[in-house]
Image (tube, helix red, strand yellow):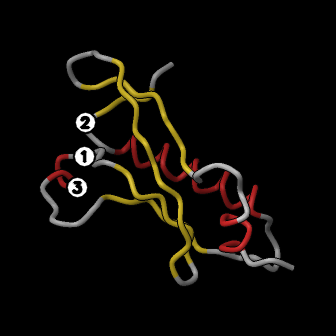
Amino acid sequence: MNTLQQQLNDLHAMPLFEIEVIDTAGNTDYIICEISVRGNQLIAQREAVSKKEENHPYIAKSAIDIDAEVFSLDDHLQDLYDEIWHDIERGDLYDLAK
């Protein structure tokens, strides 16, 4: 079976999520998340969703552990998407668009 990294590489499109949010001024915006595999984690690099992340010197990210023996790429992507949503909800710069 292919590794998750190979499956991501085989996609015909760049692996990313685009999540609609509302900023603190009430304007619609989008958070773009670039998906990659690092070690045993599926990572979504994205813009900061909290003041703490905004002031941090590193690129903001959401991450989940990979369990390729049990879960498919689709399962992992859904879990990562859910993790990003939770990070946005816990952050203080955006609200999720309805």
Tell me whether the residue at label 1 lies in contact with that at label 2, contact meaning CB atoms closer than 8 angstroms. yes
The residue indicated by pointer 1 is: 50
Q: Position of residue 42 (x, y in %)?
A: 56, 68
Task: Spot the residue most to the right.
Answer: 1
- Locate the N terminus by quadrant: bottom right
The residue at the point 54 percent across, 44 percent down is 17
Circle count:
3
Q: Nearer the viewer, residue 9 or 54?
A: 9
Residue 89 position by quadrant? top left
- Distance CA(mark 1)–CA(mark 2): 5 Å
Q: Position of residue 39 (x, y in %)?
A: 54, 84
- Mark earlier in primary sequence (3, 2): 3
Task: Indicate the amino acid at tag 2.
Answer: Leu
The circle drawn on residue 94 is none
Q: Nearer the viewer, residue 36 or 76?
A: 36
38 lies above or below 22 = below
The circle drawn on residue 93 is 2
Classify 10 Å Cα crowding around label 3: few (below 14), some (14-19), many (20 and above): some
The residue at the point 39 percent across, 42 percent down is 88
Task: Indicate the amino acid at tag 1.
Answer: Ser
